[in-house]
Image (spheres, rainbow, N blue to C red):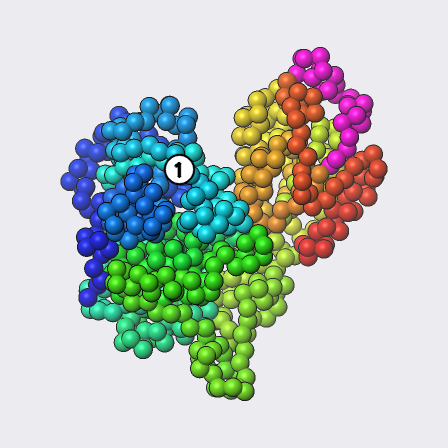
Amino acid sequence: MANTPHGGILKDLVARDEPLRETLKAEAKTLPDIVLTERQLCDLELITNGGFSPLEGFMNEADYTNVVSSLRLADGVLFPIPVTLDVSRQDIDRLSIKPGLRIALRDPRDDEALAIITVDDIYKPDFVKEAVEVFGANDPAHPSVAYLHKRVKDFYVGGKVQAIQPPTHFDYVALRYTPAELRAHFKKLSWRKVVGFQTRNPMHRAHRELTVRAARLRQANVLIHPVVGLTKPGDVDHYTRVRVYEAIMAKYPNGMGHLALLPLAMRMAGPREAVWHAIIRKNYGVTHFIVGRDHAGPGKNSQGKDFYGPYDAQDLVAKYHDELEIEMVPFQQMTYLPSTDEYQPADEVPAGVQTLDISGTELRRRLKTGAPIPDWFSYDAVVKTLRESYPPRLKQGFVLFLTGLHNSGKDTIAKALQVILNEQGGRSVSLLLGEGIRPDLDPSFGITADERSKNLQHLGFVAAELARAGAAVIAAPIAPSKASRDAIKDTVVHSAGAGGNFFTIHVATPLEHCESNDRKGIYSRARAGELKGVPGVDEPYEVPEKADLIADVTTQSVPEIVHSIVLLLETNSLL
């Protein structure tokens, strides 16, 4: 039988509030609203479908404080990760947020009202303490710590929610199950014991062998339950991964396994996240849960060491075994034995027996270079899918981001680069000059810093989309602020897939030269007060600290600079 939900009752708010749906929907039209972020959207879906049981809303200060300090809600129930709704001071003032206020929560994709929150309290969290307690260190090398400091707003709003409707999904609809639906599925098939497998990566033969072995040892079935919400930046996109999972499910013994997708925004919180994952799978009806070595670890910290020990996650799940009421299955490292053409746990292989393995780094190298991937490691259908989404470097898109003062020569360099790359062929080449998509519509001067920032956001989005499609993108805005440049790079690296190759080129031509050769008179008009928002005159230009290449037309010719950039691309195997 399916496992009992965490806290004893499945908090399926969508089902609970179904009789009130039309009333709530009408009320939402009259309420102030908050458009959710992608993370908040994932969190809300799992709050309202019961995946986060016993939560019935975003955490108030009492729950948040207890979770951060002791992994427990205010009532003592085990819950290791803060689930919060962050808002800005401007949001608070604009919406007049106060206890008792009802606010509609809207889907950022289609603006549909998904739920109504009744505000319990508004509080200002200590981000440093949250980082240290929840993630183990206030280290920006941790993706969730970086997210906390760069993207989370200054205040949290706590309160219970009433569900209007779940988010609408258009991808892999048949594979998206709520906890109630998955429990019903298990019951229909008479699955009494279910081993859950969490993953955010593609699966290969070793994963199949591991999960089959775990199920057979426990006379159980297998739930492959991958995360398709937010994962670690740089991970394989979920579209590719789900195609891989669908391919590998055909390799399971008939009737043993089932694939369902989890709309979770991961925090990469290691041991705490492992406990959280166990709670979530318990709510979905799973009875056994595989916990890996360095489960949900983000990799290396700023000192080059792992954030968490290899067995910290397993130790913490074992510590709370009695409260979790889900059996932990420790991940066994599987290795291939060519003599018998089978996988065995590495710690059970007799000494002297030949074994073969391919590391994640080696797999990525083979995908990038087109080197063969042996069938003992993965299946043909899996490799084919990965190669389609992640072509070799020579076929990947990239972004050359030239930043510098007006008249620094960056536009001339960009145009010359376009000619050279078109001459070489192999990719489409896109040139983006100015602070936006079209210089005639997005002027570089006479605009506020906020307007410039928004225009640059648009440029970053377009550059990422082009690079994702395999194009060579040459962008040459002034982009005077570090924050805007970082935001553009973040957009490209995190959303361009295999095309997330980003190079910052600082055209560091001195202001004196830029101004003395300014035929358009931009600087003289700015000095006379006729033109505002000119970096170098009335707006600062923040020099890039870690440019991939620095150029200066007063010391180098344009052909020399272009050649240096081509060599940079060749060094990175992109030409």
What's the residue at 28%, 47% (across, down)? 73
Q: Is mark 1 on a helix, strand or loop?
A: loop
Q: In which quarter of the image is residue 437?
A: top right
Comparing 573 with 439, the one in front is: 573
Instruction: Name the residue beneath numbered marker 1.
Output: 125
User: Does 398 sit left or right of 179 as displayed?
Assistant: right
Does the segment drawn in magenta span residue 523?
yes
- List x then y, in percent, for residue 506: 71, 38
Indicate left or right for 91 with 419 as reference.
left
- Side of 333 relative to 46 (left or right): right
Task: Kindly identify the residue that appears in the image at 70 percent across and 25 percent down.
Answer: 536
x then y, percent, for residue 422:
71, 46
* Residue furthest to the left: 19
- Whether residue 541 is in magenta: the answer is no
Tell me which segment is drawn in magenta.
Answer: 507-531
Mark 1 belongs to which amino acid? Pro
